Amino acid sequence: MKDEEKTKEELISELKVLRKKYTELKEFFSKDQKLIKIGGTETILVVDDNKDIRTATVKALKKYGYNLLEAGSSQQAIEIFKSHGGTIHLVLSDVVMPETNGPEMVKKLLDLQSEIKVVFMSGYAEDDIIQDDVFKIIHSDNPFIEKPFTFDEIGLIIRLQLDKKVGQK
């Protein structure tokens, strides 16, 4: 069944499943955080129009050893992506941004580099305005984290996504 054909109740049910998986991930992390090394040396592009959130996230991820690039808009992210001399391993993007939203921006980035890893974040997951975007993300197999999150939570999700093999769910 296509996403467009699903009822609101079915979509809400899927969001509840996603939240349950997220809760299980948080519980796993709190019990077994020493089993997974959070951090690395990959390059991550953080895209968020909220400067305070973007700055704090970049600062935290730098402590984990990552190389960070940051953009305050989708257009700026595309420009950075095109002009960056090295590989960008992962894009951490807000869903709701002015002009071009996160999912639309990522589509453009995937045209430039088809195997880039992606993690989406949003503080408006229950807002009717972005529910369609959130459900498209859920069905795209890209991780989604709801703001506010701890830096250990986002660090774990990023590490798991970076370690995921292409085509692996």
Image (cartoon, grey):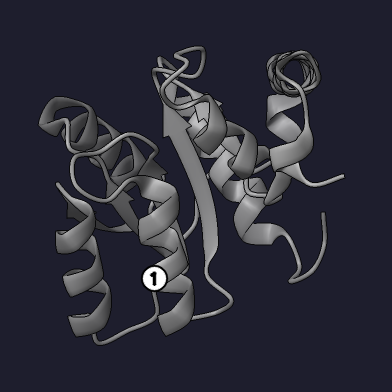
Residue ranking furthest to the bottom: 85
Depth check: give the residue in front, 156 or 96: 96
Quadrant housing residue 32: top right
Q: Residue at x 60, y 58 (%)?
A: 162
Q: Report which residue position mark 1 lands on.
A: 108
Q: Nearer the viewer, residue 38 or 110?
A: 110
Total tally of numbered discs in the picture = 1
- Residue 14, percent across and down? 78, 23
Task: Answer above or below: position of 73 versus 14.
Answer: below
Residue type, mark 1 in image? Lys
Secondary structure beneath dot 1 equals helix
Quarter of the image for residue 61 reads top left
Q: Looking at the figure, which quarter contains the C terminus?
A: bottom right
Q: Residue at left 33%, top 34%? A: 96
Dot 1, crowdedness within 10 Å: few (<14), some or many (≥20)? few
Relative placement, left or right, of 23 versus 146 is right
Q: Is residue 93 left or right of residue 79?
A: right
> Which part of the image, by quadrant, shows the N terminus?
top right
